[in-house]
Image (cartoon, rainbow, N blue to C red):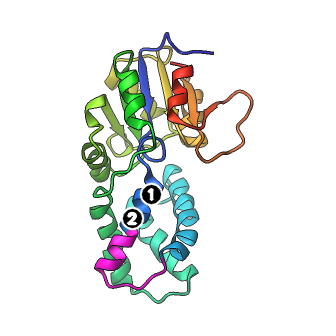
Amino acid sequence: MTFHHKKHIFFDLDHTLWDFDKNSALTFEKIFQLNDLDIDLSAFLEVYVPINLQYWKLYREEKIDKKNLKFARLNDAFKALNMQVSTSMVHKLSDDYIIHLCTFNHLFPETIAILEYLKSKYTLHIITNGFKEVQHGKLNQSNIDHYFQTVTNSEMVGVKKPNPKIFNHSLQMAKATTENSLMIGDNLEADIMGAINFGMDAICFNYHKETLAADIIGIDHLLELKQYL
């Protein structure tokens, strides 16, 4: 199957183009140093990463707000490590994390190469659930903002992927249709099933190495998109 007939390609940002795990780890290392906290980074990340994923699922499902997500994911991680960290310090760390996250801008391998390949053939866009104050910073600081005609974040729309409203909003901004559009992202629930249920074709950037259903197209490396586009 190929998608040469498509005109608009919609990318997720975090975990798809922007290497969130690497940049997040470097940010925690930086803010722990800034706040004179002696914390084993690898031990912290081992408990924090799954906690963060759980809270983002609640956030997508509108079961927790942004303010509580930012505090609770850190607070729960420190509790899991039996660390005594004051409430005021947790709040400061959550703010510092957002401030410094954009200072690290590692992209996945071949991100620039695939965007260069696609830009002359298709119109490129971003649909992201990430916080608005950092998503544009990530695009700008990593020097990929110029590849995208439109950027839709969930806070603009008031809902998150996989809610069909965010896909509808993004397509309207892009003056695109479901038929001539393709979604590329890493999250099966938010990006892939969200797009498919909205009526869009989708390709999963499966760097998590998850087992995909037979009807889901998956790639392990971004340059594999050349097989389809």
Image point 27% across, 52% down: which residue?
A: 133
Q: Which residue is mark 1?
A: 22
Can residue 182 be seen here? The reply is yes
Image point 58% across, 15% down: which residue?
A: 2
Viewer-proximal residue, 171 or 204? 204
- The type of residue carrying mark 2 is Leu
| Residue 189 drawn at (x, y percent) | 60, 42
Q: Is residue 38 magenta?
A: yes
- The type of residue carrying mark 1 is Lys
Up-down relation of residue 31 to residue 174 (above or below): below
Labelled pair 1, 2 in contact (Cβ < 8 Å): yes
Viewer-proximal residue, 206 or 193? 206
Q: Quadrant of residue 140?
A: top left
Name the disc covering residue 220, or none. Answer: none
Secondary structure of residue under mark 1: helix
Up-down relation of residue 121 to residue 132 (above or below): above
Q: Residue furthest bottom?
A: 84
Q: Which residues are magenta?
A: 28-40
| Residue 52 drawn at (x, y percent) | 51, 62
Viewer-proximal residue, 95 or 102? 102
| Residue 157 drawn at (x, y percent) | 36, 39
Q: CA distance from mark 1 to mark 2?
A: 6 Å
Quarter of the rendering occupied by the N terminus: top right
Q: Is residue 16 magenta?
A: no
Can residue 169 be seen here? The reply is no
Viewer-proximal residue, 56 or 122? 122
Secondary structure of residue under mark 2: helix
Q: Which residue is mark 2?
A: 26
| Residue 72 drawn at (x, y percent) | 47, 71
